[in-house]
Image (cartoon, rainbow, N blue to C red):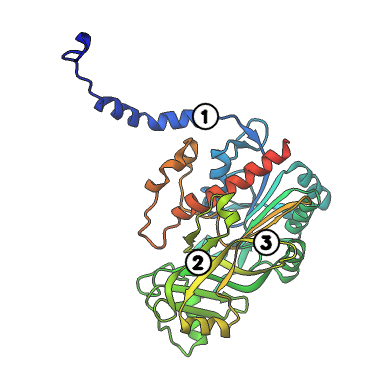
Amino acid sequence: MALPFLKNTRINIGPTIFFMLLFTPLWMYLGWYLTPKRQLVVAIVDKTVLSKKGQEHISLHWVLNHEKFTKNKKSLYKIDRDYFGFFPEKDKGFKLMGLERFNNDELNDLSRASDVAYIADAYGIYKNDWLKQGDDKEISKVIYGGLSKQDVYFLQQMKDKHKLVLAEFNCLGSPTDEHTRREFENTFGVFWSGWIGRYFDSFDTATNKEIPKWLVKNYIDQHEGKWPFWRSGIVFINADNKIVILENKTHLNNSLPFIQATSEGMNHYGLPEKIKYPFWFDIIDVDSSYNHVMAKFKLEVNANGAEILRENNIPIQFPAVTVHMASDYRFFYFSGDFCDNPIDLTSSYMKGISYFKWFLYNRSDPQERKSFFWTFYRPMVTTILNDYHKSLHH
């Protein structure tokens, strides 16, 4: 029996739901705004900054902003300002504000003031890319780039002070000189094999403008004028400029490289068990008595592909995330261009945005990288930084 005061009463919840959804971004922003700030001084090195958008370190800045980490007691990090490296200006002008301008005493001071060091990208800026001049069939002269002796000295000081150090592709490959690379390798127990690689969704040079012309030229020069590829696949480039290509179906059962996480990676760092990675990576060896591998790349090759890899001493599986976690210091090496993802910083101002991550990328596109950010990079780096911040205050 209906109560008298409810008789003939109709409840329409449609408008309520509509207005809740309409104002959800506002509630999410307010949730972020009201989250307390936390100071964590991160020294970021990025030498590959072609615009003020900071594409090569945008993923790290997203995490820092979303987690309300500050460079001092009040100020959040600015993507176009708070890093060391190459600073683009108007009319192709630029400033070089890397660690190279500091002497050892100043680098010691910086290591005392910093909680974290992150080498986001040391590849650098090249004349053809910056000035849009010259023959792009040849690798042009580097304007600025490569890991420097000052970079390595600073990282060594961070290690000696038991700080957190993170580094990723490309700090070991060209244009880093061999002596500096050896210093980094011996300091942190990771060793570059000489190979880098990348997935391409098509090797048809008539339609895929992402393939560097110098790569095609070098391969043709090395293989009697032939370029017999048109499907998707993976290209490998050696330090001596030798190029190896594995094509889908011809050499690969699946043309995409995958990253597989260990139980540690899944349980503590929130990594998916398996995820595609369609961008640049390097192949390294690890001193297993010193470091351990938390995630690894895996190539799904057929018999033909396995034979080509064997002939060129390229492994089918190799480290993706290398970790040193002990009382002396903490170190992570990411064997890919992990920090470079096509994301928008606007979403970092929304508390709880990760619950909507499924709407923020298209899984059906094999070369999209947003899913890598949302399901791999973001949870991993967020956990790393939160763990370290907690350790500093307990």
* Residue 132 in picture, x, y percent from top left: 49, 63
Residue 255, quarter of the rendered image: bottom left
Instruction: Establish if 334 lies above or below 233.
Output: above
Tell me which label, 1 or 2, sits earlier in the chain: 1
Q: Quadrant of the N terminus?
A: top left
- Looking at the image, tell me whether mark 1 or mark 3 is earlier in sequence order: 1
Dot 1 amino acid type: Tyr
| Residue tagged 2 | 133
Viewer-side residue, 327 vs 174: 327
Residue 383 seen anywhere in this rendered image of the structure:
yes
Q: Nearer the viewer, residue 311 or 13?
A: 13
The residue singled out by tag 3 in the image is 292
Give the amino acid at mark 2.
Gln
Q: Quadrant of residue 155?
A: bottom right
**Residue drawn where x is 42% and y is 83% of the image:** 227
The numbered mark at residue 118 is none
Q: Residue furthest top?
A: 4
Mark 2 or mark 3: name the one nearer the start of the chain.
Answer: 2
Q: Is residue 204 left or right of residue 72?
A: left
- In space, the residues marked 1 and 3 are separated at their CA atoms by 38 Å
Q: Secondary structure at mark 1?
A: helix
Asked if residue 269 lies left or right of residue 185, the reply is left
Between residue 192 and residue 5, name the one nearer to us: 5
Circle nearer the viewer, 1 or 3: 3
Residue 54 appears in the figure = no
Badge 2 element: loop
Disc 1 versus disc 2: distance between alpha carbons? 45 Å
Residue pointed to by mark 1: 33
x and y, in percent, of residue 128 in the image? 53, 66
* Rendered image quadrant of residue 153: bottom right
